[in-house]
Image (cartoon, helix red, strand yellow):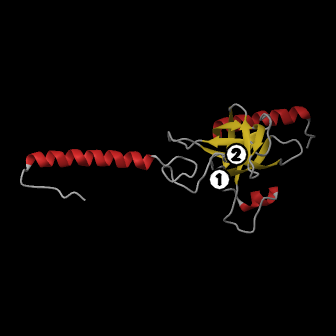
Amino acid sequence: MGLLTGEDSKLFRQFFKEVAKLRGISVNYVYPVDEETSIHGQIFPEFSSIYELDIIFESTPKIKTLKNYGWVSEDNSDKPYIAFLPYDTPHIQTKARLKLFPIGSEKNGKWFEITDINESIEFPDAYICRLAPVYVNEKEKLDYEQTNHNYIEGDNQPDENTTHNVEINKDLEESAKKVIEANKKESKNFTYLNI
């Protein structure tokens, strides 16, 4: 039994990259470079350009595997997704994201966020990352000065002139007079009451 040296660890890391290329899946990887916080405390990160990586992905890891990394929960049905990322992944950190594409389909992929990072041995050949799916929300509006959500668009806006109804009524009266005049010409025995 020998010692694991730096050269051996580099060799094992190359082995992992070959295994991920042959048996793993190809994903898009981005990491946060800046972030913006809304008035509600929600974080909107700005991401780097996309890197293509080959990883090994486990959608249903075994309980023993989760126990080894300390990621086991009380409910066995609530298992996290696990991804093994190459050791030279640029700027690996929590909040980084991976886009996994469905195999054999043309559909858009699904983004997953790294929530925890672990290593298995002293000279690891890959990072072991716990993933969570990302649900896209619309960015919150930060400027509420010119909005009033209590009213529907139209005549009921308190800060607008209500001349719109007057114009509609004038148009209706004029079109009704035209129809009445046309009807008078067609039937001479019929008369309208003036009210």
Local crowd size for mark 1, using a 10 Å CA cut-off: few (<14), some (14–19), many (≥20): few
Where is residue 151 shown, x and y percent of the image? 54, 55
Question: Which residue is depicted at the point 79% across and 60% down?
Answer: 67
Residue under label 1, please give it: 59
In the image: residue 72, left or right of residue 158: right
Is 70 above or below relative to 107? below
Q: Amino acid at mark 2?
A: Leu
Q: Which residue in the rendered view is the most extreme toward the bottom?
A: 74
Q: Nearer the viewer, residue 120 or 7?
A: 120
* Camera-nearest residue between 169 and 58: 169
Q: Classify residue 85 by image quadrant.
A: top right
Q: Nearer the viewer, mark 1 or mark 2?
A: 2
Report the residue at 86% width, 47% height from top: 121
Q: Tell me the quarter of the picture where residue 79 sits.
A: bottom right
Circle 1 SS class: loop
Residue 172, compared with residue 65, is above or below; it is: above
Question: Residue 162 bears which disc, if any?
Answer: none
Quadrant, the C terminus: bottom left
Q: Is residue 64 left or right of residue 106?
A: right
Q: Is residue 187 left or right of residue 173?
A: left
Quarter of the N terminus within the rendering: top right
- Reading the image, the residue beneath label 2 is 142
Closer-to-camera residue (76/143): 143
In the picture as drawn, the residue positioned furthest to the front comes out as 194
The amino acid beneath tag 1 is: Ser
- Residue at left offset 6%, top offset 54%: 189
Disc 1 and disc 2: Cα gap in Å? 37 Å
How would you rate the neighbour count of disc 2 (Cα within 10 Å): few for under 14, some for 14-19, many for 20 or more? few
Residue 38 image point, x, y percent: 74, 47
